[in-house]
Amino acid sequence: MNLYYLIVVFSPVLALYGIGFSSITLFDLGIFLSLVSIIFGKFVQADFVFKNQASAESYLYVILIITLSVVHFIFSYQGGEIDSIMRSIKFLIYFLFPFMLFSSISDFNKFLIYFSYAALFVAIFLIIQYLLLFFTGYFLKGHLSISFLPILRPELVEFSDSITHYKDWIRLRSVLGEPSQIGIFVGLALFVRVYFFNSFFSLINVVLIIGLVMSFSTTSYAFIVASYVYYILRRGGVYIVINIFAIFAIFVLFLYYFYLNNIEVGMGRILKSLINRIGRDGFIESYENIFNLFFGYGYGSFVLEKWLPSISRILLSFGLIGFLMFIISIFRLVNIKSFTSIYFLLIYLFLSFGSEVPLSFFNTLYILIFLYLKKNSINLNGCKKEC
């Protein structure tokens, strides 16, 4: 069981390495073997898993995506759609695996502790990278060079090999693929810890926050704010009013500091990044006909001239029908009576507009948190009330 934990909590690291076949990563191989193990290990209970741990809409969504992928393959096969089919299969596994895994995790609190320590490792490694680079000039690489496990992000290798020649502002990546992944991974750990421990300024949380700040990622800063706002909303009363004024004052001072020092590098790039991620346009008019509008082009079977977030990619890949089923499936994961569950949904939707979480390996981790928030209201301190 501990192996399942490690595969999921270290998914961003494992996803960096390929196995030499198509776009299959070490993480993909890990969850495939885990699925086989879970299915064979609980074969008698398989019917129970499907009926009790996943909504009917979620499995309808999986069936729909499979159908759409086959339709696209039949009607538009040109020799290159095999990769599109593989990408669709990976996407489905990322979506389906959490349901199977959740039914097999007997102690989810232990899983969350593993996750917390994994995020702590990422944050500490990033801090060490910056300290070594700026005080000694030495760059501590966050990836391993293994001949039979190629790095699937060539830009990561190029960045690591040429970083000492950079004279401009740089953003290090710890052991992950890019700075935004630090926000997606470590930021989630911060939110989960705030929820379960009902504390924002614990020692581990402070280290996570320092790591998030040093990532210089819009996603990281959004997670810090979202986690703190969630914390003060749970405290309630006059505490909310006091902290709202405090947050506003800090934000004004932050802007004023950058204005006085004419620092475009920091705040300017943050705002530009946010606008670029959420304000992308042009994908709606990309549809060529009614069929593509409703059923999409197939996952990965189209060429993008610019980066698009998950919401846009889902619309292009699976059309309005696939997109609608995706939204229904996600909303069915939410406990509408739980403030935390709804709040986490808002975070997930924000990431859907500003990142690739729903279409990436991160989705496995996020859906696991959805499932736990829906089913449980007991935190690590033994809180029995609805949080």
Image (cartoon, rainbow, N blue to C red):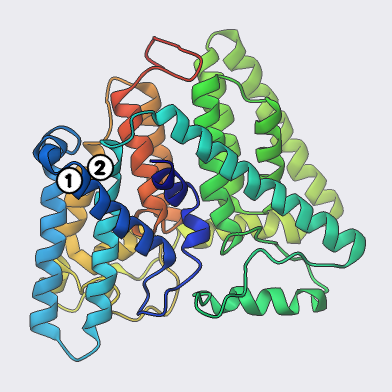
Sequence-wise, the earlier of marks 2 and 1 is: 1
Q: Residue at x 56, y 56 (%)?
A: 180
Q: Nearer the viewer, residue 262 or 224?
A: 224
**In the depicted structure, whether residue 385 falls above or below residue 49:** above
Q: Is residue 208 visible?
A: yes
Q: Nearer the viewer, residue 218 or 158?
A: 158
Q: Amino acid at mark 2?
A: Phe
What's the mark number on residue 307?
A: none
Kindly give the residue lying farthest to the front in the view shown: 41
Q: Is residue 92 left or right of residue 346?
A: left
Q: Is residue 95 left or right of residue 66?
A: right
Q: Are marks 2 and 1 in contact (CB under 8 Å)?
A: yes
What element does badge 1 sit on?
helix
For label 2, the residue is: 99
Assign the N terminus to one quadrant of the image. Answer: top left
Q: Residue at x 35, y 40 (%)?
A: 368
Res. 178 image quadrant: bottom right
Residue 52's x, y, as percent? 15, 32
Q: Nearer the viewer, mark 2 or mark 1?
A: 2
Label 2 – label 1 distance at C-alpha: 10 Å
What's the mark number on residue 58?
A: 1
